Image: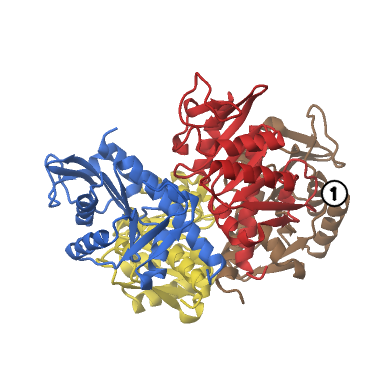
Chain colours: A blue, B yellow, C brown, D red
Amino acid sequence: MTSSEHLAQLGREFHRRGWALGTSGNFSAVVSRDPLRIAITASSLDKGQLTAEQILEIDSNGSVMPPTAGKPSAETLLHVAIVRSLGAGAVLHTHSVWSTILSDYHKGQGGFFIEGYEMLKGLSGVATHEHREWIPIVENSQDMNMLSGETTRMLEENPGVHGFLIRRHGMYTWGKDLAEAARHVEILEFLLESVGRRQMMEPQY
Amino acid sequence: MTSSEHLAQLGREFHRRGWALGTSGNFSAVVSRDPLRIAITASSLDKGQLTAEQILEIDSNGSVMPPTAGKPSAETLLHVAIVRSLGAGAVLHTHSVWSTILSDYHKGQGGFFIEGYEMLKGLSGVATHEHREWIPIVENSQDMNMLSGETTRMLEENPGVHGFLIRRHGMYTWGKDLAEAARHVEILEFLLESVGRRQMMEPQY
Amino acid sequence: MTSSEHLAQLGREFHRRGWALGTSGNFSAVVSRDPLRIAITASSLDKGQLTAEQILEIDSNGSVMPPTAGKPSAETLLHVAIVRSLGAGAVLHTHSVWSTILSDYHKGQGGFFIEGYEMLKGLSGVATHEHREWIPIVENSQDMNMLSGETTRMLEENPGVHGFLIRRHGMYTWGKDLAEAARHVEILEFLLESVGRRQMMEPQY
Amino acid sequence: MTSSEHLAQLGREFHRRGWALGTSGNFSAVVSRDPLRIAITASSLDKGQLTAEQILEIDSNGSVMPPTAGKPSAETLLHVAIVRSLGAGAVLHTHSVWSTILSDYHKGQGGFFIEGYEMLKGLSGVATHEHREWIPIVENSQDMNMLSGETTRMLEENPGVHGFLIRRHGMYTWGKDLAEAARHVEILEFLLESVGRRQMMEPQY
């Protein structure tokens, strides 16, 4: 399976699971490091119908590389920033209900901790549930230069994180490859739903 | 794919997703403008089994045009009112749990705002999350002349809206064509679930 | 499609939708009136794997009629009671999360009203949302003679109802045939989830 | 169907239903009693793609028996402890949202009762809803010798239980064979969701 086929398959699956509705969500995988080439979803697509032909190849400036042609995702620069800051091999941006509302609920603290859950062990490098995972929240913006700069700074200040939320705008996570990044999506979506429902069961929690 | 096939496919999909259970939901697409001809679901059908043969063609009075025959949806006049008021190319009425309960919860205010969510950009013409979308709520009625008149007035008073709720009766949205209207359904259902759950997490929200 | 095939198909579908998990749920359809013969699910089956061969035929005493053989559902007498009291052509007992918790939440009042919802029009004979549907709650019992007697009395006292709950034990509904009864399941499950979530949004509701 | 094929099928199904996301969940079935041989899922697998080839065979010390080879689930010793303590023929560990949050909510009491629900009759040996099922909660640990010892002690002190939770780590249940254990998963997950939502509807409940 090529990166483009894998990205298309993940897009259709995430749509089915409610994590990439409308035209939301964008997904990328590093194709080569030197020079940097990234396969990424084109802009404004219905992810439920995503095909490998709708995946573009971009360079480190976000410019589309022939023979692929089209408009890459509006958030291409965030993908590049994450690949460069962390050496990630794949970056996945999903947009679930739980990530959306928790990114709003905890905005005043700039993030929140998820701690003590066995499921945390599904995150790369985490070997015990006695782990304290900080989920940073970045303020949303339509200025992608500002948002990617803000993301780069946040990643420098929070070197160990496995994902972050943009306020009222869903989640970014990544991995060494698409399989690991996709596992991180599942793990983090599970944890967000769990802490969200836990909170609703006991508001003072 | 013909309009009838597309309408039938959407009906089956919306049923599967819980947005058109029982015999609820009705769906239409403009076939021609002059004279106005609209393809619309027949009345009282199980949308989970909807076929293209169950789509009727009507004129601007809601009369069924041969060779199609049958009883069009009870809410045909609302579809006509929306097509005429807004020039919409397709109108979709869904009936989810979240649209039903929010249409009741906010009835005293005649509607509510959805504001600051990235997902709003999936609505036609919205370019930023810094958008304030008013979701009007119309009181329910079995008098379709009254309800379509009320809808026409409401649309005149709220020219920018992308959808509205009927109290305890679900949602109407539309688009230039069926693909855009279907995207609006996904976007608005996501936003309604998000603001509904957000509210439950923090009642004073 | 025979009644047995239709019952098996509904069983598998209700299992998939979470309304007949474990070995819960039982389903019947009248095969003949004089003498009374009812096709009904055998006892203790996984409804996710239900086949037409697992449907038995019983008479008005609940005795199994050859050539079918086996142990009919423990709740056979309730099905017979509903068929006799109401002349129903099909009886469906589902066991969803929402019916279970609402049957407990409202136990003190012996039932609750669902009122003002458009979806009520999906119930046989209801022509307007301005309808007030009483959902009776019967106390649970393992004594099937007592429970079917109690059900018969309750149906006499509440002639217009379309379904009822057994406390912490799910829902019974029925119809003139299996298609109508299955529609009633969808309608009532939708309404129970809606009023349940509405309640959670505003506890004083 | 071999035990390995059945285990793989259950793994894929539980993943689809959200009960074994990421690499969570592990599943076993006794192949022989004397000497004890258990088929069990290998460690760290995506259960959504589980195949029969990924099932290992172990002995009573958790050592992998040729010709199977690989690293068995980290929680192998818990499976062995449950098989030995209870004579179970199959052990299933799932990791749903509801089991996770209830294992945390009730941690102070060391467990909680589920009582009066008809669905309890789906548990082996339970003949009436008038049953009081204690759901023990064990504190989580990465020390598998300690955790399996703790589990053995807990099972001795609570001889009648059908399952237990590990804090913030999901559920264990079992049965005489895989079919019974799988039914117990469905039953207990239904009951956990029901009591969880019931609690949210009425916090003082």
Indicate the chain on which mark 1 is placed.
Answer: C
Describe residue B201's horizontal placement relative to residue A22 as left or right.
right
Identify the residue shown where x is 28% and y is 67%.
Answer: A140
- The number of numbered discs placed on residues in the rendered structure image is 1
| On-image quarter of the C terminus of chain D | bottom right
Which residue is label 1 attached to? C144
Determine the residue positioned at 66% across, 71% down.
D204
Q: Mark 1: few, some, or many residues within 10 Å (few <14, many ≥20)?
A: some
- Percent across and percent down for residue B142 are 55, 70
Nearest to the observer: residue D57 or residue C14: D57
The N terminus of chain D - image quarter = top right
Regarding residue C3, the answer to whether it shows in the image is no
Whether residue C7 is situated above or below residue B185 in the rendered picture: above
Q: Amino acid at mark 1?
A: Met
Image location (x, y in percent) of residue A161: 33, 56
Q: In the rendering, at what x and y percent does residue A7 appear? A: 30, 42
For image coordinates 49% across by 69% down, the residue present is: B201
